[in-house]
Image (spheres, coloured by chain):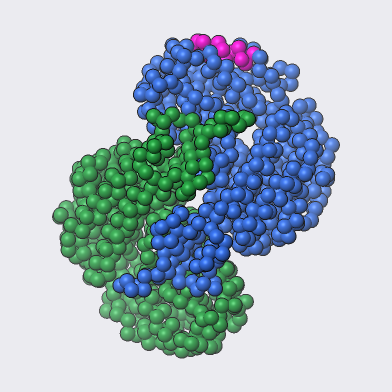
Chain colours: A green, B blue
Amino acid sequence: MTIDGSILIGARDVRRDAVFHAVDAASGAALPQPFAEANEIDVTAACVLAEAAAEAIGTLAPDARAAFIEAVAVAIEAIGDVLIETAMAETGLPRARLEGERGRTTGQLRMFAAEVRDGGWLDAAIDLALPDRVPPRADLRRMNLPLGAVAVFGASNFPLAFSVAGGDTAAAFAAGCPVVVKGHPAHPGTGELAARAIVRAVEQCKLPAGTFAFLPGRSNELGAALVADHRIKAVGFTGSRSGGLALVEIAARRAEPIPVFAEMSSINPVVLLPAAMTARASRLGADFVASLTLGAGQFCTNPGLVIVHEGGGLEDFLEAARGALDVTMRQPMLTPQIEDAYLDGIASLEWNPAAARVDGGGPVHTSERPGGVLFQTTAAAFLNDKAFGREIFGAAAVIVRCSSFEDMHHVIQSLEGQLTATLHLDAADYQSSEPLLHLLQQKVGRILINGWPTGVEVTRAMVHGGPFPASSDGRSTSVGTLAMTRFLRPICMQDVPEALLPPPLKDGNPWNVPVCRDGQGSG
Amino acid sequence: MTIDGSILIGARDVRRDAVFHAVDAASGAALPQPFAEANEIDVTAACVLAEAAAEAIGTLAPDARAAFIEAVAVAIEAIGDVLIETAMAETGLPRARLEGERGRTTGQLRMFAAEVRDGGWLDAAIDLALPDRVPPRADLRRMNLPLGAVAVFGASNFPLAFSVAGGDTAAAFAAGCPVVVKGHPAHPGTGELAARAIVRAVEQCKLPAGTFAFLPGRSNELGAALVADHRIKAVGFTGSRSGGLALVEIAARRAEPIPVFAEMSSINPVVLLPAAMTARASRLGADFVASLTLGAGQFCTNPGLVIVHEGGGLEDFLEAARGALDVTMRQPMLTPQIEDAYLDGIASLEWNPAAARVDGGGPVHTSERPGGVLFQTTAAAFLNDKAFGREIFGAAAVIVRCSSFEDMHHVIQSLEGQLTATLHLDAADYQSSEPLLHLLQQKVGRILINGWPTGVEVTRAMVHGGPFPASSDGRSTSVGTLAMTRFLRPICMQDVPEALLPPPLKDGNPWNVPVCRDGQGSG
């Protein structure tokens, strides 16, 4: 499989005169391969084909749909090492991380395939007619339908698992939706390889050409045109708050507004309780920095805020954190733009009189690679300045020193919605932590005890979402099998004859899916 | 239980100098009882109390929560005939209809209570730790949490089942959310009685005073202030498209945007297939008019559009429809404003050169009561003028005469999202109806075969929602037990010690709810 810089629409490679180049993340130099910049005609073509494919994809039997998703996983594995090497060059992420991410990508595809086969996602429910009731009750049967064509905007920080063939695409295919991917310009070669793998699976499974399209490009107008196209029925996005909100607004202004599931912004508070700090402040400091600096801090779940009580090991925590920062290997950031935004975010805190550097305080940027940075402030200063609560994408964190549990409570109460909250506590902390835990539950999609938020397991029970602005729709997750429910809606069939019922609702249950009959059984 | 025109906030009756009067629907005269007009201070007070109650209500064990909802049903029954008499005066709806609606209201409360006890709505899922895996997997447990305080805007056309103690309120209580109701000014006395029943149940069950509040008033500003209050976390609305969209916009502009579940606008297409028309055109005409004129056409599911092939019984259908209209009893509309809007809608079609009256053509308005009206047009004219697709709330319908199946397909394809679509067909129609059926599935929340859309059964399998603008969120329903999922969101607990886990996720499962463990079991 080779990269030639094409747009992929249906079974065709499309070239355009307008091209762009990816940047070598390590050197900042442009990479040689030119990539076609998709335009509005490509958007229309991709959406027309996707709409035409929607019924065929949406009514595929679970086995056939699952087989397609598994074929995508096999095709990604078949790309071979060029996928890893391309991603390394385009993102600066190390080989081991990318190999792990490839495994995660194919693993989540196979997990969705298994979920599709299970059929529980159809949420089939049958309330049989009650002809003798006064008035008689009709035969009522409900199941989930796919929403239709889905636009996916991949993330820069997971070029495989959250991009072209990543979680949103897998979830949309699992739900029975065609997918049009707006390719991320930071990793167009990686994206094209993954896109070609999906196209191969589409062809192998003899699915309609509109099942999938790949539209690479740099412009905001390209993404805006895609979300505005009336044939698109939902959007999955992972990225910045400003980018996500722009798509939310475009979607809301359509003649037919559509849901946008944007995973956007989170500072992932970590709350350190006294008994845990007394027992292991130094280890917590070192482990915290390991999570903070993982992947140059470029994780949605990066722990950017520490809320801690004064005294009781805090100085040991800070010393250990400083020591760990000093010996942390630096890695290039994903793009020059991300690095600039990171340095700007740090500069704004350095100019903030209420913030003080508590790492070594040396230059953030050395030998072409920025390092991790720690600031501290007080609860009152934090509450007085919303800037402290804004995400700085990268390995920067603010430590809020609180002189009472009440202050910790106020700081937590002031937070916006978050993907995660972490508490470090021992049994002696249970009582004092309980009100904080209850408050944090109102703010986040995932609570962790005595762990670190980076690293998101792909399972049935995972929630990677949370109240705004962690997600534009706090009732959803973008990781885990529950993610496919974002692209489904219920429909009720009243007195529909057996011959016209869709398979999951037929009396004979030919797909053998779980059905709740008159309130009994699954669902 | 007596009506005194109070605002009900917590356990207190609040009076205001600003008052308004309900209108006797039959005579148009103001009714004597003055009702306090809630203001922004009342909004704040209600929301502060609701926020303070959210944790207690949200963590109630299923039995206690269900007992409260059942106590509301009992308290509504205990109001006695004054509830029916008040509603008759304020809405003009006949006694039998209102008695039936009361039964539906208490029935749906009890259905939600049973659903709460079942516990399946928690969607509890546990993925146990895999400590020996490389890397080890954490213990992950997921459940649904209530969103927090919910604002409910009742509908004028169902003063009991879709108003103060109606479906949205019942669903929100079932999900564990406090409720603040903006009382509909068309039935303030009916609303106050239902509100007092809820307050009585709150007191009986010793729940926090903020569990429920009732804010009557006429102004748009009152509703806007309620939706804008940062303590409100979701909105349920049934009413006009303009009203629903205004609330959607206010909610989207908040610092923390929140979901608005607005059930708004639908013309509920009816498609008549040839074999069914050949077999029973006259009966279809008469039955159609019965559904169209039920409750003066004031149903969300009123069949306002008929799509039919030329010939084959169409003239018989029209003649029977005309005959049925002539003998239909007229009843007053709910409010003077609704009647004015109805007459305006008819006038706009009468001035439309592409529309022709096909009922008797006589005056619409006689003896203080408007009657039903039928227009006909062609497929081309329908497609050429979006005005034909707009809802006229009341007993008006447009019959689109199509000269081919292709035209029927185009007319259906041009439709916006709908609550329902109905097909009348016989076995000989199955083949030709299948593409229309598939297309309609993309447009609606409920498909009916050989029935009529008015009358919405409250069951597990019901869907009363649909793509925009039938609902502002097409992935939801506002009738049936599935409605409670609108007010829930998932949260994941990672490595949380048994002592700190919420009951549904504890190893011992003290609430005895369905739990999916490692992919096995319910869910």
Most foreground residue, A182 or B484: B484
The image position of residue A172, as x and y in percent, is: 36, 49
Region rendered in magenta: B314-326
The image position of residue A210, as x and y in percent, is: 28, 41
Q: Residue at x 47, y 74 (%)?
A: A449
Up-down relation of residue A52 to residue A224 (above or below): above
Quadrant hosting residue A324: bottom left
Most foreground residue, A445 or B31: A445
Most foreground residue, B295 or A192: B295
Please identify the quadrant where the N terminus of chain A is shown.
Answer: bottom left
The image position of residue B356, as x and y in percent, is: 53, 15
Q: Residue at x 79, y 34 (%)?
A: B85
Magenta-drawn stretch contains B324: yes
- Left or right placement of residue B468 versus residue B154 in this view: left
Q: Residue at x 76, y 52 (%)?
A: B200
Residue A401 visible in the shown view? no
Up-down relation of residue B361 to residue B473 (above or below): above
The image position of residue B513, as x and y in percent, is: 53, 58
Residue B136 visible in the shown view? yes
- Left or right placement of residue B403 versus residue B489 in this view: left
Magenta-drawn stretch contains B375: no
Most foreground residue, B479 or B106: B106
**Main SS of residues in magenta:** helix
Quadrant hosting residue A397: bottom left
Which residue is the extreme one toward the left?
A: A2
Up-down relation of residue B412 to residue B466 (above or below): above
